[in-house]
Amino acid sequence: MQDIARKAGVSSATVSRVINQSGYVSSETRKKVEAAIQQMDYVPNSQAVSLKTGSSKTLGIVASNFSDTMMVLVRSFTLAAQQEGYTVTFYITDEDKQKELDVLEMLRGKRLDGIFLLIRLNDWSAIEPYAKYGPIVTWQRVDSNHIASVYMDQYHAYTLGLEHLYASGCRSIVNLYSNSHGLNTKSRIKAYEDFCTRHLLPVHSADLFMGLNTSRDGERVAQWWLEQSVKPDAFMTSSDSVAAGLVTQAQRLGCHLPEDFSVIGFDNIEISRLLDISTIDYPVAKQAKNAFALIFHQLTNREVFLEPLDFQLISRKTTKN
C-alpha cells in the first residue's frame, strides 16, 4: 500500500480508504489511486484482511452427500450470502465423520465465519461445542440451545399427502422413507401410522421401504410392485427423485398412472413438474434464505426477516383428483 501511495502521490491512509471503500476521497484522487493499483497489479491479501478484521467473509455449507433438493438449498443460500458480500464454500463429507469435524475445525480456526450444516454425521454432542466459535445453522431437526434449525415438521406434510390419496380413493398406501435415524423420518412414520389408524387401513412395515433416496431406488420399487400378488394402490415417496424413478420405470413396465397406482413426490423440484408428478411443495429455497439470515444475524447483530414456511400439495397427473 505504501508503494501504491508513493506512485499515486497520496498518503497510505488515502489508499486504504479507496481499497476499503470507506471515508471520503475526491474523484480525481480516487482515479489516481485506482490507476496505480492497476499498474502494480495489486490484490489485497485475503488472509491478512481476515487476521485484521477477525472475519474471513466465507461461509461453509456441509453435507454428507448431494441431491437435487440440496442443489436448490445451496443455490438459494449462496445467492443470499453473496448479496451481503460473503463467499460460500460447499463441502461434501461422503459419509466421513472426520471430514465433517475437519470443516468444524475451520470454524474454530477462523477460516470460516459460519456453517450451514445440511445433513450431519457426528452426534450433536460433538458438534455443539463448535458453536462458540461461530454460528452453526442446520437443515435438520434438532433440539439445541446452541444450534439453530430451519427444519419443518414433516408430519404435517405427509398427512397432507396421505389424506389427498385417501380422498382420491386409495386404500392400500405404502410410505417410502430415506434414512432410518432422522427425526424427519420418525415424523413421517408417525404420520403414516396415525393416518392408517384413523382410517382403519392396513399398515405396511416401514422396515421394507427404508433407505430410498435416488431415482434408481424408485425404479426398484416399481419392479417390486409388479411382482406383488396383492398390489398397493398408492405410494407416498421420500423425494421427487424417488418418485421420478418410480413413475418412469412403471411406464416402461406398461403401467398406467394413476389408474394402476398413484404417486406423490416430495420437494416440488423441477423434475416433478417436468414429469407431471403430484408432490408436496417443500420450500427449501426459503429455508436456505432463513439459514443465511440466522447466521448473518449472529455475525452482525442486525435485524433480519425470516420467510414464513408452509407445505402445499401440488396435484398433477400421478394422482386422481
Image (cartoon, rainbow, N blue to C red):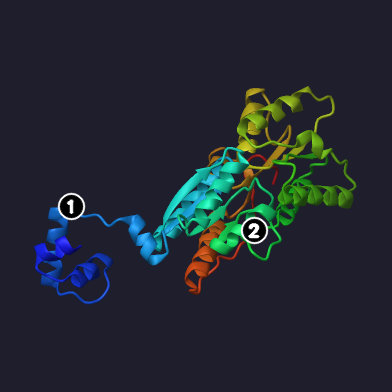
- Return the residue nearer the eye: 187 or 168: 187
Q: Is residue 111 visible?
A: yes
| Residue under the image location 86 percent in, 41 percent down | 203
Residue 41, numbered label: 1
**Height in image: 289 above or below 26?**
above
Find residue 87 and report its horizontal and vertical position in percent. 41, 55
**Height in image: 65 above or below 260?**
below
**Height in image: 256 above or below 36?**
above
- On the rendered structure, is 262 left or right of 105? right
- Crowding at dot 2, Cα within 10 Å, few <14 / some 14-19 / many 20+, comes out as some
Q: Which residue is mark 2?
A: 128
Image-quadrant location for residue 311:
bottom right
- Crowding at dot 1, Cα within 10 Å, few <14 / some 14-19 / many 20+, comes out as few
Q: Is residue 135 visible?
A: no
| Residue under the image location 61 percent in, 33 percent down | 215
- On the rendered structure, is 160 left or right of 249? right
Among all residues in the image, which is located at the extreme bottom? Answer: 24
- On the rendered structure, is 145 left or right of 170? left
| Residue under the image location 10 percent in, 71 percent down | 28
Given the image, on which type of amino acid does mark 2 rest?
Answer: Glu
Q: State which quarter of the image contains the N terminus.
A: bottom left
Label 1's element?
A: loop
